[in-house]
Image: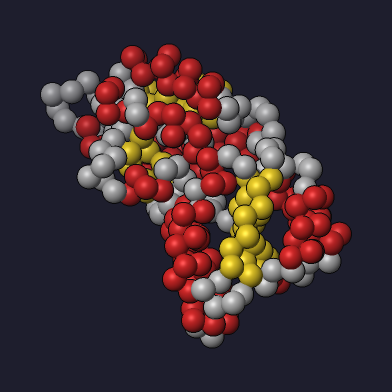
Amino acid sequence: MKFKPLALAATLVTLGAASFATPAMAQEQYIPLLSYRTGAYAPNGIPWANGKQDYLKYVNANGGVNGVKIAYEECETGYATDKGVECYERLKGRGASSFDPQSTGITFALTDKAPIDKIPLITLGYGLAASQDGGVFKWNFPLMGSYWTAADILIQHLGEKEGGLDKLKGKKIALVYHDSPFGKEPIPLLQKRAEMHGFQLNLLPVTAPGVEQKATWLQVRRDRPDYVLLWGWGVMNSTALKEAVATGFPREKMYGV
C-alpha cells in the first residue's frame, strides 16, 4: 500500500501539532522525521522524506497549524531497526510530539517504549496491524488502514473475481513475502481467511533485500498456484516481476501491495 507523501505529512502535522495547539503552550511543536535515504530501500525512502519535509516547510510558510509552527529534524535509519531505535532514543528527549517510524521493524521495537515515554507512534498504512486494538496498544495510532486491511482487500477481490468467496475453496494461493516483520504481518489474516474459505495458503519467504529469488519462483512454477500475492518492498518487487516472467507465471494472476 502506497500513500502520497503530502497526504502522509498532512496527517502527521494534524496529529502532531493541531491537537496540541492551545494558547497556554509554546507556539511550536517538534516532530522528528525518521527517514531512509540510504541503503537498499532508498528509492522508496527518498521521495517520501522529501515530500514530508516540503510539506512541513509549506505549512510553516503559511503560518503553521492554528498558529503553531513545526520544528523538525531528520534522522537517517537506512530502514534498519537498530538505527531507528537509536534515532528514537536520541531525539525523544527534545520534546517530540510523535514519531512516524517509517518501518514496521522499527515500529515493533518502539511499541514497548512508547507507553513508558508517552510519545504517540503514528503509522500510516504500515506497522503493527494488531495495534488497531486501541484498548491494548494505547500509544500506537495506525491510520489509513493496516497490513491486515490490505490483505483482506486482496482476498475479497480474488473472491469477487471467482464469483464469490466460496469459490476460493480448493484454490492455491501463494504469498511471496519479504522475510521481515513487514512481510510477515499479513500472514495471520491470510491464514484465518484460508481456514474460513478453504483455500490452500503457501508461504514463500524472500530474504531481504530480495535480489535473489530464483529458487522461490521455481517453487511457484512447481506448485502452480492459482494466484500469487506479492508482499515486497524496493528492489524485491522488480526482481519478483522479472523472475515471474522468466518462469512463465502469468501476470494477471499476481497481486501485490
Question: Which residue is depicted at the point 41% across and 54% down?
Answer: 145
What is the tally of numbered marks visible in this picture?
0
Which sits in the foreground, 250 or 90?
250
> Which quarter shows the C terminus?
bottom right
Question: Which residue is depicted at the point 28% across and 22% down?
Answer: 117
Which sits in the foreground, 151 or 198?
198
Residue 105 place in picture, x, y as percent: 51, 34
In this view of the protein, can residue 28 be seen by the observer?
no
Task: Single out the residue that lies furthest toward the left.
Answer: 24
Left or right of residue 61, residue 190 in this image = right
Task: Determine whether 170 is above or below 104 in the image.
Answer: below
Residue 91 place in picture, x, y as percent: 40, 17
Query: Quadrant of the rendered structure where residue 128 is?
Result: top left
Left or right of residue 240, residue 115 in this image = left
Task: Determine whether 229 is above or below 26 in the image.
Answer: below
Question: Which residue is depicted at the point 57% across and 46% down?
Answer: 183
In this view of the protein, can residue 249 be seen by the observer?
yes
Task: Single out the residue that lies furthest toward the bottom.
Answer: 163
| Colour scheme shown | secondary structure
Left or right of residue 175, residue 5 in this image = left
Question: Which residue is depicted at the point 83% across and 66% down?
Answer: 248
Query: Quadrant of the rendered structure where residue 107 is?
Result: top left
Residue 231 place in picture, x, y as percent: 61, 52
